Amino acid sequence: MVRRMTPSQFNSWIRQQEQRQREAIRRHNQEVDRINRANKAAAEKAVRDYNREIERVNKGNKQVVDGFNREINKYNQSHRSAVTKYNRAVRAHNARVEQDRQRRLSTLRAISIPRHTEVRNSTFALSERYEGIQKSERSGAYSDLITLSEREASNSAMVAEALLTEAPPAPDNAHDTGILEYLAGFSEDVCNRWRGALHALSPTNPDAARHFCTSVREIFSEILNRWAEDTDVIADDPDCDKTQQGTPSRRSKIRYLLRKKGADTLEMLGFVEQDIEDILLLFPIFNKGTHSAAGALNFASLLALRQRVEGGIMFLAAVAL
């Protein structure tokens, strides 16, 4: 049954309903405000906790990165020190080096019926490439490499002379090239491999050349792969020459290293390639010589091989740094 109200009662009822509604809204707003404050506090706490964790992780990462950078700097400094030592030794001998190179080339030209013609021809080719980089317009930008290149050309002639003459002069191995310091920077295994190769390099050891040459091939590859990683070479030049396996060729790696030094001229690229080929060409000859009773290599030849290879490793190290 509908309740009858007077106008005064109806107005009073309306005011009561409005009051209840306002009270409900007030309580709702209070609850919303409470929830918002709680959510804000929780969010701020989460942000603070997150920032603290980020700061902790960043601090830890910074310590790791700083430690890594210190090791890298130490590693690079060790290599630079070794190469610098070799550069000093080469410069100290520089005046005599050119005289020796010219004398040895004259000796090789005077041989009427030479053995190992491929060695002699390779030596002449390397000497011509050296003279080419001397004449290059940009040669002043990489004078240290030219100084070392002169030594390489002379060492090539030294080995050829040792192989092709009856009584070759003993090579000068007196100076410290820094090669042990350099190889130790790669790994103790590489350094020990070189020490073992030197220990085995004896004319009475039939496996001397094989042991020595195998180790040297690995060291050359180690240097190129360490300083010219495949991904870096391809990123620098996606169209670089590649092997059948799709990896950058040795020429591409050498070009990449020379480009980093601002020395990527055709003359210098050709010289570095020829220098490595000149060394690798010796390996089968020395392998055959140490396994042949009739053609056994004398100690002077083995010492010449050591000096040639040692200089080649340090030259490639200088290219890589």
Image: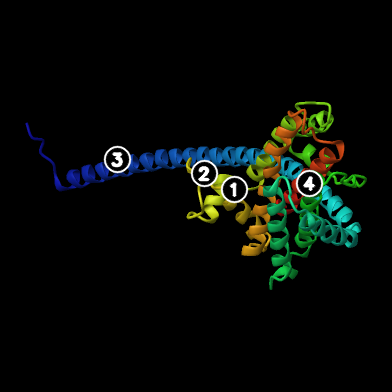
Work out which residue is located at the far left of the displayed protein and give it. 1
Cα separation, mark 2 vs mark 4, equals 38 Å
Q: Which amino acid does label 1 sit on?
A: Arg
Label 2 or label 3, whichever comes before in sequence order:
3
Cα separation, mark 2 vs mark 3, equals 82 Å
Work out which residue is located at the far front of the displayed protein and give it. 112
Q: Nearer the viewer, residue 115 or 55?
A: 115
Which mark, residue 20?
A: 3
Q: Which of the 4 image quadrants contains residue 196? A: top right
Q: Position of residue 225 (x, y in %)?
A: 63, 43
Which mark, residue 288?
A: none
Label 3 or label 4, whichever comes before in sequence order:
3
Q: Name the residue under label 2.
A: 247
Q: Name the residue under label 1.
A: 250
Q: Which amino acid does label 2 sit on?
A: Thr
* Residue at position x 42%, y 41% in the image: 30
